[in-house]
């Protein structure tokens, strides 16, 4: 599939660079801030960065952008590494922006010596008030003209912990009237007496994003530094630092952030859902996190397929979650074992069937020639889905009703002869008869039926717990609504139901993905244990996406 599609705009650029001999190989990086778990948007950035160096000569680094000591945790670092590997990618080097703190400090000193940076005592409020507006120039700080010697001395004292948080910053000396607001003497370092997850208490000054990111790219000789569109205005500053410091000229390219409807893709917002217990945790199967999707039963292939299909764009747009669902359905159709599970059982007694149990053999997956077969017991008492029966059916009802015939999947054709009810008039069981020569695979009855039902053998059905998930939010874009995004959570995003499964499921513990016939795709949840099986619904069988495509 990837061979067929045309090049995206970043591939076109790289193609040209390689042809022109500008680079022999390309180097990209995936640079997460370890302040949360990765989500589906990150997956798209991962597939892009790692995908490029699979396609072209070169490699990709995993770099943790850990310059903010207060929000970062080792737990996040581990989860990120795990997710990237699970998605099927290998990084060349595992790196941390915090490993460059010494180099970055030297870079800052270089700028001071070139009279390109100064220590400012203004508070953040004062700085903001002097920043100007897009149409009005800002004002120079009174500290802007400190001597190089004074700046060097103050900056060193900042590093040595002589000053309290927020009392001083180091700023680049560019132009307070610059058209690009980000070029109006941006802050390079702030004072923060905080413990860092890797450097401990060594530092009490920390570089700002803009003074760490580009320089880290440069230190690693990144050729193509790919980020999302909000960094377009930062590119000028990115290039300014590279020029002034005369370091390796990495280049920044931007693509549109990927958003999916009916969810949020922002670590900060996802963290709120976790902290305020709207979900069970980062890997709650309703979460758009890589770990949530994994627990939900998504495969790495399906996520890569999705990222490939959405490609990359220069303009932001909202992607329909049904495309993601389409991708997992496509993959699971090929690999999932077929099993029968009845959710709301109705007893069927087959009155003309002998009092014996036979074994039926049936395939595990008709889409997979190597899928093998399984055995199912069949006897004179089985369970079918209550809503596969109607006493007074409308026209064209092809499921079971009095006098009507259906096929039991992989077994026989049965006919409903009698409806049993309790005193209150509720249907309690059905008396049916089976057509003796209608066994699947060796049917000589000549009877055509329209409906095929799933069923389980009553005597050995296994009770299981099934978690049916729905969209996490009721609206397409909860961040675009009035009020707090959490007001739009879907209160029915999780329904727990009971199911009665064919017993093969007990011996399937090595398999983890199933199609419950006529129901959907399911996987074992991590809380599942012998004697207490728990399944997550990955996705329903209904394909809203394909329908949309046909309409269009
Ligand atoms: P968030 O707001 O969720 O924290 P972020 O951009 O701050 O997102 P980072 O950890 O800084 O998260 O992102 C790592 C990389 O992933 C960056 O290159 C970023 O541009 C990219 N990325 C993050 N979110 C998306 C998204 N929704 N679509 C595409 N790429 C994304
Ligand atoms: Mg970020």
Image: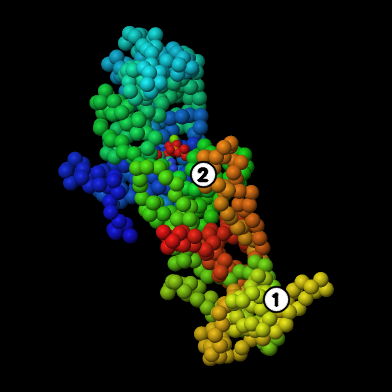
Q: Nearer the viewer, residue 106 or 218?
A: 218
Q: Is residue 370 left or right of residue 423?
A: left
The quarter of the picture where the N terminus appears is: bottom left
- Check the image and report above or below for 195 versus 127: below
- In the figure, 219 relative to 467: above or below? above
Q: Would you say 250 lies left or right of 134 here? A: left
Task: Name the residue: 68% across, 88% down.
Answer: 352
Place of residue 172 in the rendered image (x, y in percent of width and height, measured from the top left): 34, 19
In this rendering, the count of numbered labels is 2
Q: Residue at x 72, y 82 (%)?
A: 418
Label 2 Cα crowd, 10 Å radius (few <14 / some 14-19 / many 20+): some
The residue indicated by pointer 1 is 391
Compared to 534, does 20 lie above or below?
A: above
Alpha carbon separation for disc pair 2 and 1: 43 Å
Point 31% across, 42% down: residue: 28
Q: Nearer the viewer, residue 210 or 154?
A: 210
> Mark 2 vs mark 1: which is more N-terminal?
1
Picture disc at residue 477? 2
Frontmost residue, 53 versus 408: 408
Count residues near mark 1 (Cα–Cα under 10 Å), then give few for <14, some for 14-19, many for 20+: few
* Between 522 and 543, the one nearer to me in the picture: 543
Is 35 positioned to the left or the right of 134 in the image?
A: right
Q: Secondary structure at mark 2?
A: loop
């Amino acid at each position: 599939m990837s061979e067929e599609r045309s090049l995206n705009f970043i591939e076109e650029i790289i193609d040209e660079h390689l042809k022109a001999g500008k680079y022999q190989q390309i180097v990209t990086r995936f640079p997460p801030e370890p302040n949360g778990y990765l989500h589906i948007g990150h997956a798209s950035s991962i597939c892009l960065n790692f995908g490029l160096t699979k396609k072209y000569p070169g490699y990709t680094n995993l770099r943790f952008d850990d310059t903010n000591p207060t929000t970062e945790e080792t737990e996040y670092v581990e989860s990120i590494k795990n997710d990237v590997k699970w998605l099927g990618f290998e990084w060349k080097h595992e790196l941390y922006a915090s490993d460059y703190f010494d180099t970055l400090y030297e870079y800052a000193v270089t700028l001071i010596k070139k009279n390109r940076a100064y220590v400012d005592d203004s508070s953040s409020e004062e700085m903001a008030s002097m920043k100007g507006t897009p149409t009005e120039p800002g004002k120079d700080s009174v500290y802007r003209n400190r001597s190089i010697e004074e700046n060097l001395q103050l900056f060193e004292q900042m590093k040595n912990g002589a000053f309290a948080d927020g009392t001083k910053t180091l700023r680049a000396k560019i132009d307070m009237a610059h058209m690009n607001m980000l070029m109006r003497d941006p802050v390079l370092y702030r004072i923060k007496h905080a413990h860092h997850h890797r450097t401990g208490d060594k530092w009490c000054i920390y570089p700002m994003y803009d003074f760490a990111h580009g320089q880290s790219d440069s230190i690693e000789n990144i050729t193509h530094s790919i980020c999302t569109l909000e960094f377009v205005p930062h590119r000028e500053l990115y290039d300014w630092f590279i020029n002034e410091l005369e370091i390796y000229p990495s280049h920044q390219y931007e693509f549109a952030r990927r958003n999916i409807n009916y969810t949020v893709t922002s670590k900060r917002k996802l963290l709120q859902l976790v902290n305020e217990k709207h979900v069970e945790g980062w890997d709650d199967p309703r979460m758009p996190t890589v770990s949530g999707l994994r627990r939900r039963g998504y495969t790495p292939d399906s996520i890569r397929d999705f990222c490939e299909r959405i490609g990359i764009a220069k303009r932001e747009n909202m992607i329909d979650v049904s495309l993601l669902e389409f991708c997992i359905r496509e993959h699971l159709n090929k690999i999932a074992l077929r099993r029968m599970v009845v959710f709301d059982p109705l007893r069927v007694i087959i009155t003309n069937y002998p009092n014996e149990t036979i074994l039926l053999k049936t395939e595990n997956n008709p889409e997979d020639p190597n899928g093998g077969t399984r055995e199912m017991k069949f006897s004179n008492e089985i369970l079918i889905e209550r809503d596969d029966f109607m006493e007074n059916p409308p026209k064209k009802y092809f499921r079971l009703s009095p006098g009507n015939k259906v096929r039991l999947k992989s077994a026989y054709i049965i006919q409903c002869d009698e409806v049993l009810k309790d005193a209150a008039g509720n249907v309690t069981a059905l008396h049916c008869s089976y057509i003796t020569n209608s066994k699947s695979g060796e049917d000589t009855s000549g009877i055509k039926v329209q409906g095929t039902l799933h069923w389980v053998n009553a005597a050995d059905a296994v009770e299981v717990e099934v978690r049916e998930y729905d969209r996490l939010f009721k609206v397409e874009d909860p961040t675009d609504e009035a009020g707090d995004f959490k007001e739009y959570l879907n209160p029915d995003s999780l329904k727990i139901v009971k199911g009665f499964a064919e017993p093969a499921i007990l011996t399937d513990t090595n398999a983890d993905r199933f199609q419950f016939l006529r129901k959907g795709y399911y996987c074992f949840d991590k809380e599942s244990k012998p004697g207490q099986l728990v399944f997550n619904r990955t996705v329903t069988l209904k394909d809203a996406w394909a329908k949309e495509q046909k309409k269009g």
